[in-house]
Every structure is written in C-alpha cells, then in structure tokens.
Image (cartoon, rainbow, N blue to C red):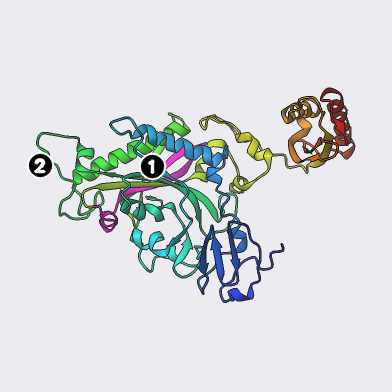
Amino acid sequence: MVVVCPRILPGCRLSQITRLLSTKAASVNGTKVEVLGREYTGDHMTNVTPHLLSHIGRDLHLQPHHPLRHVAQRVTQHMYRQYLSPRGNPLFSVHSQLHPVVTTHQNFDSLLIPKDHVSRKKSDNFYINETHLLRAHTSAHQSELISMGFDNFLVIGDVYRRDDIDASHYPVFHQLEGVRLCTLKELYGTHQNMDAYHLFENGERTEDHQGVHSAEAARRMEAELKGCLLGLATSLFGQDTEVRWVDAYFPFTHPSWELEVQINGEWVELLGCGIMEQEILANAGVQDKIGWAFGLGLERWAMKLYGIPDIRLFWSTDLGFLSQFRFDDPATPVTYKAVSKYNPCINDISFWLPKDQQYESADFYDLVRSVGGSLVEQVNLVDSFTHPKKQLTSHCYRIVYRHMERVLTQEEVNDVHRKIEQEAASSLQVSIR
Ligand code: PHE
C-alpha cells in the first residue's frame, strides 16, 4: 500500500487521511488509532504517523539473537547476580512487554515533570491524543509498578521521541530501567540499637540529599547505586575501562548523575540515575522505603559494545547484519563487520528434494558456502511446497552474492551459481527445476 502522507501535520484533519499503511500491530484509520489491540480516538494532539506505527510490535529487545536482546540479557543477568533473596533467588522482576501507549500522567505527572516542561512538547513526542502518547522513556512505568508492590524491578521496552534521524538518532529506540526500593533494615542491616538509624528526617534539601532523607541514608543509597552501575559497566566494557560520574538533573531523582565511560579516547554517556524523589514513592503508597533508579539506552550500549556504526542497523532484517549476532551466550564477544557497500546480485535456485533420502537445508547451506566462498553473503529458504500428485517437495533458496571489496559481474555470479546447481544435483541428489 502506498503511503500518501508521510506525517500527520498539525492542522491536517485526521479524517482527511485515508487508510495509509497498517501493520497488524498498529494503525491510523480516520480518527481511530489502534495500537496492539487497544483503540484510541485521535484529536488535535495526534501526531503519530503510519510509518512510525509500523515499528510497534517489532519488539527488537525480545527477538532471539538480536544485539539489543543480548545487551538487555547481560544487564538483567548482572542485576540478578547482584541482588539475591536470602534463599538465593533474584530479587529483580523483569517487565519487558508493557504496552507502549501510556498516559500523560504516567509519562510526565507521576514523575513530577512540571506542566510547562519542555519535554512535554508536541514537537518532541508522539501523541496518540491529548491524554495518551507513546512512552518517551521507560520511567513512565515506575510509579505504577511501585503501586503494584514491586520493590526491585527492571522495565525493558521501546521508547519514542521525535528527533532528527541520523547515525545516532532514530525516533524509536529501547531503554532499560532499573528501580530498587530499600527499607531501613535492607540499607543498614540489623543492629542492636536500630533507633539510632533513620531513613527520614526533616531537613533542608541540599546538593547531596533531599530534605526528607537523612544524609546517611542518602549516602548509603548513592554508594549502593554507583557500586551496582560501575560493576555493570565494567562487566560489559571491561575491568580497565575509564569511568566518571557527572552531576545531572532529572525532575524525578535527586541527587542525579550520569555515568560516562571512555571508549577509544572519547567520553560516552552510558546512563542516567539518581535517588528517587520521595514524593513519587509517597504518591504510589510507599511510606517506609527509599529508592534509586537508573535508565539506559540499549542502542547506545550495543553500538559501543559491538562497534555498530549506525542506529538504523538495529532495524535491519538483512541477514548480513543479523547473522553476526547469532549466538546463545549473550556475553560472546563480537565486533560488527560492515555489510558490503557494493550492490548484491541475487539469484534463486529451485529443486525437488530427493524422494527417499534424507535432506537437510543445512547441508545445502554448507555446500553453497564451500562452492561460493566469500562471494556469498546470505542463503535463505524462500519457498517450500509439496506437489500433491507427485508427492515431491520443492525448495527455493535465494542466494545473495556480494563481495566486500569489489563489484561482482553477472557472469562471475552466474558461473558460481551454475557450479552450485551442479554440485547440489550430484552430492545432494536433488533435481534442479
Ligand atoms: N528517564 C531518563 C531518560 O530517559 C533516564 C533516567 C531514568 C534517569 C531513571 C534517572 C533515573 O533520560
């Protein structure tokens, strides 16, 4: 289907827009906006586009072997190991499938973001309507999860911000949020004279702590938070990585910091964090705990970890990209190798499988690799059917020929392709169609 209007412009009536493009996951149709099975009525604030909505449901962070999932798994494993219950079970729960449409209350108000704060601007967010938007950060779920009784949790998900598109910005990216609430006992351990220890006191807000927090409780939370995050950064980027803390500001934490690491001589911001504003906890019904939170961008981590040069690559369905991350242990060290800039030559090959002999696609893949060598970038099974009368199964494979350093000529490709056909016929007993 053709996309007529790439962006629903301010002042452009929704009803003027015919059905543009829809995926199963999300669509705009007239004034109706549907996202993952939920329906909303658009209004003057609506600025989601069919193109943007087409990203919803891709769930890159949940796709097996996707680099973003590898990073999310490594962070999760670190948190699991770091915080265990007395019986040895992980304390943190993981929420990775929360609906991406949140209310303006969740995304802003629950986090004490002022009504006139710049981050609410229509030009910076994707609004579904006046009251709903695609979450701009995973922090949007903090308050609700705390109200539900969670004390230690991670939120992993896609987030949406209107921004320029370039090698390091894309309107959809992925964040991982961590929240931990501690009681007095958890923070200080059990002592004989517990009366001497406090989480709260009536004091002045300073650079180092909120007015309601005791200086000592704030100090301990800060030490725990920073220790946990330093451990995380060095376990992923290496024990010798140079790190530094930079003071920061977020409306929902105080004090707040950013963690930077030095990679190839350049300081890179890895995450934002801080001691949660006590008012957020109080509004969520928690009186006796103090909390910390952090949020990190999975793309940023994956780009630095694997040397991926462009954020748009994460959306690639090209196996030239994806196949480089096909490993089960997320801690497998890999360095991304650029997919060739030369145009691919694509040739299909179809054959009937042998009738009374075992056939495995993997054998064909091996054969293609050994005959085609470095000329072959990818091989994929694109069609399979069984002829009802002949009782024969046919497979069609698409072979992508592409060389890293030079343009391939059609003759050269045809030559290799013919060799693959001959070799398949003779060693796998298939009959070329
Ligand atoms: N939500 C913040 C962002 O998107 C990150 C953050 C999370 C900062 C939690 C502090 C605490 O930039």
Q: Which residues are magenta?
A: 259-286
Residue 403: give x, y in percent of width and height.
77, 35
Instruction: Tell which circle, 1 or 2, labels the residue nearer the N-terminal end.
Output: 1
Task: Name the amino acid type tagged 2.
Answer: Asp
Residue 65: give x, y in percent of width and height.
57, 37
Secondary structure category for the residue under label 1? strand
Q: Of all residues shown, which one is farthest toward the top?
A: 427
Asked if the magenta segment contains residue 71, the reply would be: no
92, above or below 282, in the image? above
Quadrant in which the N terminus is drawn: bottom right
Q: Is residue 204 visible?
A: yes
User: In terms of depth relative to the viewer, which is nearer, 71 or 364?
Assistant: 364
- Please indicate whether residue 254 sits to the left or right of residue 96 in the image: left
Asked if the magenta segment contains residue 268, the reply would be: yes
Q: Which residue does the numbered mark 2 point to in the structure image?
A: 195
Q: Which residue does the numbered mark 1 point to in the structure image?
A: 93
Task: Name the amino acid type tagged 1.
Answer: Ser
Q: Are marks 1 and 2 in contact (CB under 8 Å)?
A: no
Quadrant in which the C terminus is drawn: top right
